[in-house]
Amino acid sequence: MKGTGALTLADGHVYPGELIGSSSVQGEVVFFTGMTGYQEVLTDPSYRGQIIVFTYPLIGQYGISEQDSESRQIQVSGVVVQTLANNGLRSDLADWLAASDIPVLTQVDTRALVHHLRNQGDQIGILTCGTSSVQEQSNLIATVSIKQPEVYPTDYEAGHIVCLDYGVKKSMIEALQERQMKVTVVPFDTPKTVIDELKPDGLLFSNGPGDPSQLDHLIPEINKLALAYPTLGICMGHQLIAKAFGCRIEKQHHGHRGANHPVRQLKTGRVFMTSQNHGYVVQADSVQNSELNVAYEHINDGSIEGLLHPTHPILTVQFHPEAHPGPLEAMVIFDQFVAGILKQEVAYAGS
Ligand SMILES: NC(=O)CC[C@H](N)C(=O)O
């Protein structure tokens, strides 16, 4: 179904367009600046419940392919684009969004919209064509986390990682499998006693949607887990571990969502271009009174991009070393994590 529609922001600004789809949705309106990677973004569970605005004006131009999905379904609530590609008679992306009942607002002045969000901040919005009612989603992590453990084997098993699933992307699991790690993905609230029985060699605390304070009740358990095993935390996992060791988290004015975010490793001065997707961040002032040290910082705004424990093998990163979409150069984080578990040296890790 196609018709006149609009995105209405919480501050009252209205962005008209052509709405494809029949449902109205509400969600935080955020923008992604990468030129490619729309399929990975749409299926990344960290975007659950959000309305995503693509800054690149033409979206859908290279179709859809099965291997590029980061989870089993589209996770965003709604999509806003300038132009949805239509190669001839049909568009794979438009068909997929329609089959998934995800509304798309096209023909939007996305430059004006993103300019506004950059000035006024990410905020809730509603995509409407004036039909169905709006339902707010609460505990987003519980929605996207698996319900039963799942095992991802590898041909030659050098070690075993247990992944706490806050909404894990497929590429993180694959990055570990490629490094000869079997991965067992467990529900987000799996107690330490159950994880101990799996005899992991290391833990991955995954990415995930929404505000990390959803899981405040699990922070003491996360602290115990991270102290017990070599630990890597990514994005939501980074934020939760930061909290577990005394840091505070704050909402960003507007999030980092794109594929060209420069990050500096403090110890070596080495700069990585990274893929990012987050709207919360570790409050810089809180780190000095915490048990952790800053390991990485964002070059553009100086925000905290990674933390290290001084005596335990705990590394956390705010950026996405698994990329997908985006540059692969931060994959060294997985090399470093696995090498630490296997007690091997890794070039350029610099911890
Ligand atoms: N990719 C993620 O894990 C995002 C973490 C959190 N939802 C944030 O927006 O900051």
Image (cartoon, rainbow, N blue to C red):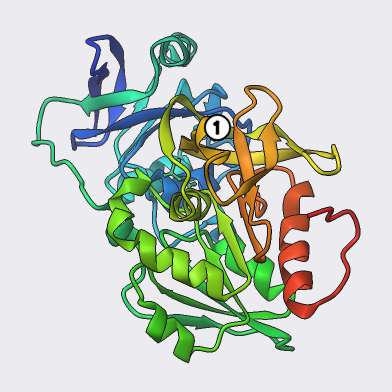
Q: Residue furthest front?
A: 289
List x then y, in percent, for residue 67. Answer: 59, 61
The residue carrying pointer 1 sits among few (fewer than 14), some (14 to 19) or many (20 or more) residues within 10 Å by Cα, namely some
Task: Give the image quarter of residue 28.
Answer: top left
Place of residue 2 in the rendered image (x, y in percent of width and height, measured from the top left)? 26, 29
Q: Does mark 1's beta carbon lie closer than 8 Å to ligand 1?
A: no
Report which quarter residue 35 is drawn in. top right
The image position of residue 218, as x and y in percent, is: 33, 62
Q: Residue furthest right?
A: 347
Q: Amino acid at mark 1?
A: Ala
Identity of the residue drawn at 28% across and 61% down: 142
Identify the residue position indicated by label 1 in the image. 284
Q: Is residue 150 left or right of residue 49?
A: right
Image quarter (top left, top right, bottom left or bottom right) of the N terminus? top left
In terms of secondary structure, where does tag 1 sit?
Answer: helix
Q: Ligand 1, what quadrant?
A: top left
Viewport quadrant of the C terminus: bottom right
* Residue drawn at point x = 43 percent, y = 52 percent: 208
Residue positioned 38% across, 48% down in the render: 209
Closer to us: 197 or 206: 197
Tell me: 100 left or right of 238: left
